[in-house]
Image: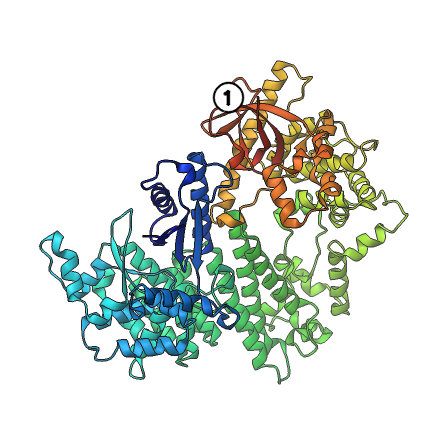
């Protein structure tokens, strides 16, 4: 901590939580100060920390400032984040050099301030190499401390923010410490001079466990390279680390140690997660494969890790991935079976199994590429392809049956599923072995008893065709079933004769594909022509999806289409049954139907096709009574449509408030379930509608109605005006919206109206909430987290 003339400065240790840092920063700001409104600003230096930590710290400081009732606009804290630069030439070179020069003027030796020197040298590789080379001179390579430096450097190089507990180090060094007060002194005395210089000592605030890591990842990487040299490889070092039973069995900090060790062997690098590149395997395994050019050694390392981690199935899965990448398919199959014995219903393992069979299938096709194809020599490849399809289908079934549905992963599985299906049975290249299956001669042979059964089963691929996802709705079973060879028993297959099987198969696929192609529905939606009345329910559904009526957001996007929005929404509503209440809609159909009516009213309030508010409220009663089963869009519509009106009786208002509060409660739970793994900076709340002055559907004002007014501002300026409520103070917007009454209590905003239970409203802009308990008025916005309060004003 330092005091400058106009600032108070402190260095933040990322080990401490944002809450604790914020508390200490507030105490530093008010140290020996009498007036909290006139304290010096605090400059916080945060070194090499991620954005999520910075966002958490910023939010904690804002909460602290608001709780202290600091006047708005007062400069309280400055956050200076120092991060590694990947393009140092484009950065300012003079600034870090000036910092070091100032430190020298103050009497500090810059060589002992390693972080500042690294910054001043712009993380130069030559400087780091020279520093480490000088550091490792005269180091004892046979000592236990040097071995421990090896292990810490290996973890710090490949696992971000990793560390090893001090007690692990004490156990490895075999230190006997009898008195606790001498523990730290004894430990530091046992370290070599090199270890004392490069080790950082950390302490967890919750568990109070002390830990060790190297001062910087670049230094750790260079130490690892120079210590290993030409006599030892990183794979050997990783094997030695796995053989250290003392570290494995030590109980203090064991969970963290095993977590970092798992990441060392299993975690793939991803740009989306902040890494510099995407890797096929963990960076360590990729290094062994590519730099050491020894895939067999990488396999042995993973096998040893599998044994050390008590035959963890995910290590077996990684082994299988590594083996099939190097075309060792039989071994890969063995390891996947080993993993599947422990986790038979894991979608990731089943997907990997499908990938093994897919790669195996491709290898078998390549092996017979230049020979004459017959049912006999291609049977094995077909059987492998069918096993791959079965695994992909089972993986998708398992994933959709459990609660953790991941859309991108689902798409990846179905891509391989469809790709394998089409590769085997339709649209195959001329030189592919499957082309010969559809020749009359092969069909004739396939009917013989001597033909391999898997060739005949190749025609039974109806069950392998991708079935419509349950998310398409209830009308998915109305898809026409395509009867192929495999739908008939073997005795019937012998009697059925198909003279042109390839043409016949193409026709069948054409019928099936019409339900998913835009060409068919586009012909039905020609400009100026009405939609035919005789359409199947599924055809209607596909036309609705093409018109943009398939989900909540795509329907609302019609509000920006001034030319065709009304016509498209009318066409969408015309495809629904005339009596929706008796039609027994699915939940998604009800949502899309209601949102289409609301959107059409926003574009054309006098349109005769718009249903009244009471009919839409009645349709909402078909939502599941158990709100846990309701989709977020359904809960959103319940809060929107059941918002009380002024002319409602007291009993009606209370009933509507109960419905809205119940929906908001489950919206809030769903929001945090969805956002638990999302960084703070990405948690945005979008307001779709505002509460207007009208009645019925006229009380819902969509945000697009204000675009003409706010378009003159830049994007960032517009966002800040909406956040602070300044946009709602414009006369054109104020006259459209309705202000409601409420009060604040201990910093929480409550809505005036409900009698049985307080109705808390989330404020969009927290600094606008008064510190004391006051009567207020505000505008109401409707979001997928529940109603929110804009433009809070205290009653005079």
Q: Residue at x 48, y 69 (%)?
A: 279
* Residue 714 visible somewhere in the drawing: yes
At which x and y percent is residue 621?
Answer: 64, 28
Q: How many marks?
A: 1
* Residue 334 visible somewhere in the drawing: no
Callout 1: SS = loop
Question: Vertically, is 471 above or below 457?
Answer: above
Q: Residue 136's quadrant in the figure? A: bottom left
At which x and y percent is residue 759?
Answer: 53, 25
Q: Is residue 755 left or right of residue 505?
A: left
From the viewer's side, name the closer residue of 323 and 215.
215
Looking at the rendering, in which quadrant would you find the C terminus? top right
Question: Vertically, is 692 above or below 649?
Answer: below
Category of crowding for the residue at label 1, using alpha-carbon neighbours closer than 10 angstroms: few (below 14), some (14–19), many (at least 20): few
Question: Vertically, is 784 above or below 158?
Answer: above
Q: Is residue 389 left or right of residue 736?
A: left
Residue furthest to the right: 528
At which x and y percent is residue 751?
Answer: 56, 24
At which x and y percent is residue 608?
Answer: 84, 31
Q: Residue at x 63, y 57 (%)?
A: 466
From the viewer's side, name the closer residue of 42 and 423.
42
Q: Residue 267's quadrant in the figure? A: bottom left
Residue behind mark 1: 757
Q: Residue at x 65, y 71 (%)?
A: 446
From the viewer's side, name the closer residue of 655 and 113.
113
């Amino acid at each position: 901590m330092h005091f400058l003339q106009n600032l108070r400065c402190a260095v933040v240790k990322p080990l401490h939580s944002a809450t604790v840092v914020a508390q200490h920063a507030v105490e530093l700001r008010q140290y020996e100060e009498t007036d909290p409104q006139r304290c010096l600003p605090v400059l916080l230096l945060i070194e090499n920390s991620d954005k999520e930590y910075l966002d958490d710290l910023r939010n904690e400081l804002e909460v602290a400032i608001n709780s202290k009732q600091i006047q708005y606009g007062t400069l309280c804290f400055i956050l200076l984040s120092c991060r590694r630069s990947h393009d140092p030439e484009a950065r300012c070179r003079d600034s870090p050099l000036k910092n070091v020069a100032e430190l020298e003027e103050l009497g500090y030796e810059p060589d002992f301030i390693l972080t500042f020197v690294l910054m001043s040298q712009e993380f130069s590789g030559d400087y780091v190499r020279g520093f480490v080379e000088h550091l490792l001179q005269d180091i004892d390579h046979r000592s236990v401390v040097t071995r421990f430096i090896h292990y810490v450097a290996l973890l710090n190089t490949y696992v971000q923010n990793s560390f090893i507990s001090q007690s692990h180090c004490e156990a490895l060094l075999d230190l006997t410490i009898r008195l606790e007060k001498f523990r730290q002194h004894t430990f530091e005395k046992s370290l070599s001079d090199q270890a004392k210089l490069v080790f950082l000592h950390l302490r967890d605030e919750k568990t109070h466990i002390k830990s060790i890591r190297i001062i910087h990842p670049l230094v750790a990487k260079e130490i690892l390279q120079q210590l290993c040299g030409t006599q030892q490889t990183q794979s050997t070092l990783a094997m030695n680390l796995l053989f250290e039973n003392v570290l494995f069995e030590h109980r203090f900090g064991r969970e963290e140690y095993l977590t970092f060790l798992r990441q060392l062997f299993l975690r793939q690098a991803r740009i989306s997660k902040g890494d510099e590149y995407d890797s096929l395997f963990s960076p360590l395994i990729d290094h062994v494969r590519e730099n050491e050019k020894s895939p067999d050694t990488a396999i042995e390392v993973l096998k040893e890790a599998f044994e050390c981690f008590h035959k963890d199935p995910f290590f077996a899965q990684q082994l299988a991935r590594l083996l099939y990448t190097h075309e060792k398919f039989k071994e890969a199959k063995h390891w996947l079976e080993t993993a599947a014995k422990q986790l038979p219903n894991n979608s990731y393992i089943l997907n990997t199994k499908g990938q093994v069979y897919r790669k195996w299938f491709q290898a078998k096709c390549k092996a017979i590429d230049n020979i004459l194809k017959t049912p006999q020599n291609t049977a094995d490849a077909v059987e492998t392809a069918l096993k791959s399809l079965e695994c992909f289908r089972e993986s998708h079934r398992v994933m959709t049956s459990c609660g953790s549905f991941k859309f991108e992963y689902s798409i990846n599985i179905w891509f391989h599923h469809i790709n394998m299906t089409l590769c085997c049975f339709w649209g195959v290249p001329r030189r592919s072995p499957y082309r010969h299956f559809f020749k009359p001669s092969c069909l004739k042979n396939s009917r013989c008893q001597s033909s391999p059964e898997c060739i005949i089963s190749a025609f039974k691929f109806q069950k392998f065709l991708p079935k419509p996802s349950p998310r398409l709705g209830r009308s998915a079973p109305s898809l026409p079933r395509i009867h192929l060879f495999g739908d008939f028993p073997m005795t019937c297959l012998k009697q059925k004769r198909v003279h042109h099987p390839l043409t016949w198969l193409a026709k069948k696929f054409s019928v099936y594909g019409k339900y998913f192609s835009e060409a068919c529905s586009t012909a039905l939606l020609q400009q100026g022509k009405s939609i035919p009345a005789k359409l199947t329910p599924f055809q209607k559904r596909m036309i609705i999806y093409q018109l943009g009526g398939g989900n909540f957001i795509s329907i609302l996007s019609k509000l920006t289409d001034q030319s065709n929005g009304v016509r498209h929404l009318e066409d969408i509503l015309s495809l629904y049954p005339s009596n929706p209440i008796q039609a027994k809609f699915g939940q998604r159909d009800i949502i899309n139907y209601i949102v289409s009516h609301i959107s059409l009213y926003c574009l054309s309030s006098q349109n005769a096709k718009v249903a009244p508010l009471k009919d839409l409220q009645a349709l909402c009663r078909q939502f599941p009574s158990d709100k846990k089963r309701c989709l977020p869009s359904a809960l959103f519509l319940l809060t929107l449509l059941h918002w009380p009106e002024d002319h409602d009786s007291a009993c009606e208002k209370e009933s509507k408030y109960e419905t809205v509060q119940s929906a908001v409660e489950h919206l809030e739970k769903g929001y945090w379930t969805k956002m638990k793994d999302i960084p703070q900076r990405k948690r945005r709340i979008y307001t779709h509608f505002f509460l207007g002055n009208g009645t019925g559907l006229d009380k819902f004002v969509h945000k697009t109605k204000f675009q003409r007014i706010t378009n003159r501002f830049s994007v960032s300026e517009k966002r800040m005006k909406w956040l602070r409520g300044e946009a709602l103070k414009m006369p054109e917007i104020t006259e459209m919206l309705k202000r409601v009454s409420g009060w604040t209590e201990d910093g929480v905003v409550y809505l005036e109206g409900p009698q049985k239970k307080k109705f808390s409203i989330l404020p969009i802009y927290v600094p606008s909430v008064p510190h004391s308990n006051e009567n207020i008025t505000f505008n109401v916005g409707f979001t997928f987290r529940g109603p929110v309060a804009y433009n809070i004003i205290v009653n005079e």
